[in-house]
């Protein structure tokens, strides 16, 4: 089974939500999200709570 990286998990998030939608969930700018290569640890919980996506699916290196 192929290991899911944080970058792959972030790409999956972007398949479901736009950067604008994520920015609105978090109260930050779309430009800030554009700089991400993966979901920052501090945003895993609020994104999980807003989307219902498990933290381990958003940031597997931290929550697997």
Image: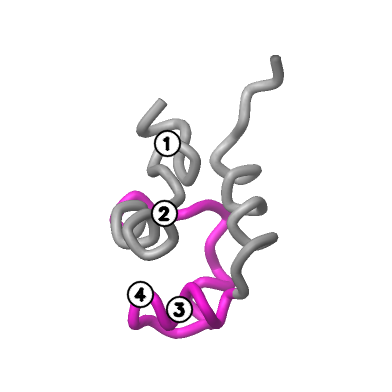
Which region shows up in magenta? 19-42
- Where residue 14 sits in the image (x, y, percent)? 64, 62
Disc nearer the start of the sequence (4/1): 4
Mark 3 vs 2: CB contact within 8 A: no
Residue most extreme to the front: 52
- Where residue 13 sits in the image (x, y, percent)? 59, 56
- Where residue 8 sits in the image (x, y, percent)? 65, 43
Disc 4 residue crowd, few under 14, some 14–19, many 20+, Cα 10 Å = some
Mark 2 vs 1: CB contact within 8 A: no
Task: Out of 36 and 1, give the one closest to the viewer.
Answer: 1
Name the residue that disc number 4 marks: 26
Name the residue that disc number 1 marks: 56
Q: Which residue is painted at 48% across and 73% down in the image?
A: 22
Disc 1 residue crowd, few under 14, some 14–19, many 20+, Cα 10 Å = some
What's the distance in space between the residues labelled 2 and 1, CA to CA?
11 Å
Decide: is 18 above or below 4: below
Mark 4 vs 3: CB contact within 8 A: yes
Disc nearer the start of the sequence (1/3): 3
Locate the C terminus by quadrant: top left
- Where residue 49 sits in the image (x, y, percent)? 32, 58
Locate the N terminus by quadrant: top right
Disc nearer the start of the sequence (2/4): 4
Decide: is 57 above or below 15: above
Task: Out of 21 and 42, give the one closest to the viewer.
Answer: 21
What's the distance in space between the residues labelled 4 and 3, CA to CA?
5 Å
Disc 2 residue crowd, few under 14, some 14–19, many 20+, Cα 10 Å = few
Disc 3 residue crowd, few under 14, some 14–19, many 20+, Cα 10 Å = some
Residue 52 tag number? 2
Q: Which residue is painted at 44% across and 31% down in the image?
A: 61
Name the residue that disc number 3 marks: 23
């Amino acid at each position: 089974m192929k290991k899911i990286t944080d970058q792959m998990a972030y790409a999956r998030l972007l398949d479901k939500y736009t950067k604008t939608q994520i920015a609105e969930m978090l109260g930050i700018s779309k430009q800030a999200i554009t700089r991400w290569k993966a979901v920052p640890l501090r945003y895993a919980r609020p994104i999980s709570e807003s989307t219902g996506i498990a933290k381990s699916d958003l940031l597997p290196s931290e929550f697997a």
